[in-house]
Amino acid sequence: MGGKGQIYARVNHVSKSGMSRTISLAVVHKGKIVTLDNTAFARVYGDSIKNGEVRINGCGMDMLFEATYRLYQFIFDQQRKPYQKHLVRYEEY
């Protein structure tokens, strides 16, 4: 399992209309996976929270990317280091 600031993302459910998803984001902390769903950060990357589930609205794009991007924007200063500089390229795996 990784670490070093990696964010793990999962789609838990897609609405019947396809216009929203419930998602989970997690990080590795001290060797354990810690979900961010029940933290203040969930309000940053989700559009709503109901019964402990984080919902993000949208379709036609990668909504997990959108959620991680929102979280990154909140945590880091974009002028200092753009989001794209933190992405791991497929050829580097």
Image: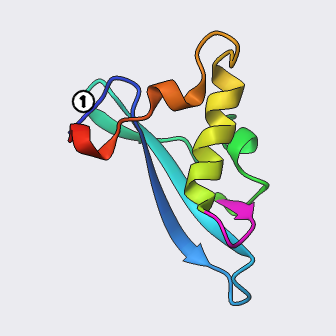
Residue 34: % across, % down: 41, 39
Task: Say which of 89 and 2 sits in front.
Answer: 89
Position of the C terminus, as image quadrant, is top left
Residue at x-position 62% and y-position 60%: 63
Position of the N terminus, as image quadrant, is top left
In the image, the segment drawn in magenta is 54-61
Residue at x-position 68% and y-position 19%: 78
Give the image quarter of residue 60: bottom right
In the depicted structure, whether residue 12 falls above or below residue 3: below
Q: In this view, does 82 lie to the left or right of 46?
A: left
In the depicted structure, whether residue 79 falls above or below residue 88: above
Residue 25: % across, % down: 51, 48
Whether residue 53 is visible: yes
> Which color scheme does this rendered protein use?
rainbow
Give the image quarter of residue 48: bottom right
Task: Say which of 59 and 12 sits in front.
Answer: 59
Asked if the magenta segment contains residue 60, the reply would be: yes
Asked if the magenta segment contains residue 68, the reply would be: no
Task: Say which of 82 and 55 sits in front.
Answer: 82
Residue 89: % across, % down: 34, 39
Q: Which amino acid does label 1 sit on?
A: Gly
In the depicted structure, whether residue 84 falls above or below residue 4: below
Residue at x-position 71% and y-position 27%: 74
Disc 1 designates what residue?
31
